[in-house]
Amino acid sequence: MSNLRNSVRLIGFLGGAPEVKEISKTKKLAKMSIATNESYKNEKGEKVEETHWHNLVLWDKQADIAAKYLVKGSEIAIEGKLATKSYSDKDGVKRYYTEIVVNEVLMLGKNKS
């Protein structure tokens, strides 16, 4: 049950190709975002569809796999944990952002490449 404390699982479509950076000879980092869709009926009974974007971070072997096989529009399932970071913008205002540090990636659907 300890894995449930900070666990995220999503299925979605990549919004763009992974951006891969080599941090050192043994460390790689890939960043990308996926879109998930949600639909519901509002109080008038009309169907409403919403798209939510999620920032993903993949390290090392996962980053290599993403760079090799994933392209914009790929459907993937991910499992990971939430990480919130902060920075100061140009006006000195502290800003926060949340990303998902991915532990596992599963490629779904057909290969887009």
Image (cartoon, rainbow, N blue to C red):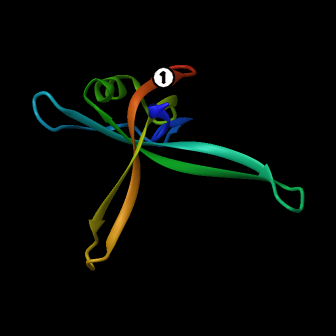
Q: Is residue 98 left or right of residue 39?
A: left
The residue at the point 39 percent across, 58 percent down is 97
Three-letter code for the amino acid on which mark 1 is drawn:
Leu
The residue at the point 55 percent across, 44 percent down is 35
Residue farthest toward the top in the current orientation of the protein: 110
Circle 1: is it few (<14), some (14-19), or many (20+) Cα within 10 Å?
Answer: few
Q: Is residue 42 left or right of residue 23?
A: right
The residue at the point 31 percent across, 72 percent down is 94
Q: Is residue 84 left or right of residue 87?
A: right
- What percent of the width, then of the height, locates residue 29? 25, 37
- What percent of the width, then of the height, locates residue 19? 31, 40
Residue farthest toward the bottom in the current orientation of the protein: 91
Identify residue for label 1: 106
- What percent of the width, then of the height, locates residue 25? 10, 29
Does 40 appear above or below 14?
A: below
The residue at the point 52 percent across, 29 percent down is 77
Quarter of the picture containing the C terminus is top left
Does 72 appear above or below 89?
A: above
- What percent of the width, then of the height, locates residue 32? 39, 41
Looking at this view, is 113 or 44 the one in front?
44
Q: Is residue 74 left or right of residue 38?
A: left
Does 70 appear above or below 8?
A: above
Looking at this view, is 57 or 70 the one in front?
57
Q: Tell me where residue 24 sits by quadrant.
A: top left
Label 1 secondary element: strand
Number of dots carrying numbers: 1
